[in-house]
């Protein structure tokens, strides 16, 4: 089959879904590859590098969408892109089907199959295709780098001839994939790192990364995440009060807050309130990775960096993986390549869209003119 990748059309998106290396691997599966001219430039991959890897370069998006039997891209398609889909074609990209129902229906009507990378089941076998995790890992790392860039001090404590420097104190709220990446990065830079999650089962992981788990003074146990498939559910009002009380205690003591707390299919919980920001020292930094879903900090402005009257910088960027486009594209293209490996079981360049396969079924949101979202629950862990 011909696998093709267009230039991303979303404003400011720097990633690309195919790299020269991933194209080489796709050709070993019996596929041929095609890319739109310039698609990889912002991630550091020139047309010449693709050509050297045996990829055909075409000039326009229209040519690309017409030439490719499988289109692989990063961002959900626009209406104009869906209008270019045709019967029998396959699109692989992020899609967020619950938020894009009309677009999903439009795609189903074309007869194309759509595989949503955000719907890959989070089971062990599918980890290599788990683009939500590969991008969250980058976002967590980059959040700490962004915090450091806006913080006028060292992370690590130092004793120098010019004076003693105390270590920075970093609080990470939410220890899912992004939070754990932030904890690891912060601890490796030498900051005293504290972390909180409603799921107590992450305490061991947090401590093994050199950070301190923040326990609440609360009679009930924290949430049992295992009961909700590893995800958090909204907290009870009493639990939330205990959490906010603890954060009010910590606010004057911490220099940097990285917040990553999310609850599936809901706005982000507001956990760092205006009065907590006011209690923070001037020069402190908040990086709110939940900004796209409204933010964990009450004062976050999505896509903006603001400085409050008391000198606290609040970063609400929503494009952290795109800010590390070379790394993000490499990992995302590898996730796509693994998806295509599973779709090409005989390595003969023929796609077998096996709807009996848990992972392929789980991620497929349109197939044979039908909307196939939501999928049935996966049979295996
Ligand atoms: P997420 O992005 O949905 O949420 C981020 C974190 O915020 C979660 O850890 C959640 O517990 C936490 N959170 C929610 N409300 C909070 C609150 N009020 N205060 C503090 N923290 C709060 O999570 P994610 O990164 O997508 O990961 C979700 C789960 O899936 C994790 O358990 C992760 O280990 C698991 N996972 C499993 C696989 C796999 O293949 N087995 C792959 C990826 C993730």
Image (tube, rainbow, N blue to C red):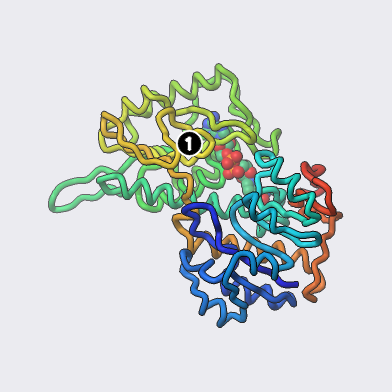
Label 1 residue near ligand 1, CB within 8 Å: yes
> Splitting the image into 4 quarters, where does residue 58 fall?
bottom right
Residue 236 visible in the picture:
yes
Q: Quadrant of the N terminus?
A: bottom right
Judge the density around disc 1: few (<14), some (14-19), many (≥20) Cα neighbours within 10 Å: many
> Splitting the image into 4 quarters, where does residue 231 fall?
top right
Query: Which element carries disc 1, helix, strand or loop?
Result: strand
**Which quarter is ligand 1 in?**
top right
Residue 212 visible in the picture:
no
Residue at 53% x, 22% y is 240
The one of 48 and 80 positioned closer to us in this rendering: 80
Residue at 47% x, 50% y is 320
Q: How far across and how far down the image is residue 153, in percent? A: 25, 46
For residue 97, side relative to residue 170 (left or right)? right
Residue with the mark numbered 1? 173
Q: How far across and how far down the image is residue 146, in percent? A: 37, 49
Query: Can you say whether 219 is above or below 222 in the image?
Result: above
The one of 20 and 233 positioned closer to us in this rendering: 20
Q: How far across and how far down the image is residue 116, in percent? A: 69, 51
Residue at 81% x, 53% y is 367
Q: Residue furthest left?
A: 162
Q: How far across and how far down the image is residue 95, in percent? A: 66, 48
């Amino acid at each position: 089959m011909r696998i093709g990748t267009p230039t991303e059309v979303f404003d400011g998106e720097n990633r690309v879904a195919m790299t020269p290396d991933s194209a080489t691997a796709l050709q070993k599966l019996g596929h041929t590859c095609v890319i739109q001219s310039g698609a990889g430039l912002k991630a550091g991959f020139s047309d010449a590098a693709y050509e050297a890897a045996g990829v055909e370069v075409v000039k326009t998006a229209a040519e690309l969408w017409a030439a490719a039997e499988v289109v692989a891209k990063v961002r959900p398609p626009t209406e104009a892109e869906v209008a270019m889909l045709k019967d029998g074609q396959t699109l692989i990209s992020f899609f967020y089907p619950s938020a894009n129902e009309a677009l999903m229906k439009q795609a189903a009507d074309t007869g194309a199959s759509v595989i949503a990378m955000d719907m890959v089941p989070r089971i062990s076998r599918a980890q290599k295709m788990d683009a939500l995790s590969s991008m969250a890992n980058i976002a967590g790392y980059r959040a700490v780098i962004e915090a450091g860039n806006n913080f006028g001090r060292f992370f690590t404590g130092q004793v120098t001839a010019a004076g003693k420097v105390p270590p920075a104190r970093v609080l990470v709220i939410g220890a899912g994939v992004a939070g754990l990446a932030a904890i690891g990065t912060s601890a490796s830079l030498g900051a005293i790192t504290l972390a909180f999650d409603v799921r107590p089962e992450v305490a061991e992981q947090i401590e093994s990364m050199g950070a301190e788990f923040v326990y609440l003074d609360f009679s009930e146990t924290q949430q049992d995440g295992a009961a909700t498939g590893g995800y958090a559910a909204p907290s009870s009002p009493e639990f939330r009060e205990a959490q906010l009380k603890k954060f009010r205690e910590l606010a004057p003591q911490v220099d940097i807050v990285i917040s990553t707390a999310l609850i599936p299919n809901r706005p982000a919980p507001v956990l760092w309130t205006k009065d907590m920001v006011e209690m923070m020292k001037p020069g402190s930094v908040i990086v709110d990775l939940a900004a796209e879903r409204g933010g964990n900090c009450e004062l976050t402005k999505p896509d903006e960096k603001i400085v409050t009257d008391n000198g606290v910088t609040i970063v609400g960027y929503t494009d952290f993986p795109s800010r590390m486009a070379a790394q993000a594209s490499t990992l995302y293209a590898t996730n796509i390549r693994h998806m295509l490996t599973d779709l090409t079981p005989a390595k003969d360049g023929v796609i077998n869209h096996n709807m009996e396969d848990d992972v392929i079924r789980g991620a497929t949101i349109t197939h044979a003119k039908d909307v196939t979202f939501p999928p049935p629950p996966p049979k295996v862990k």
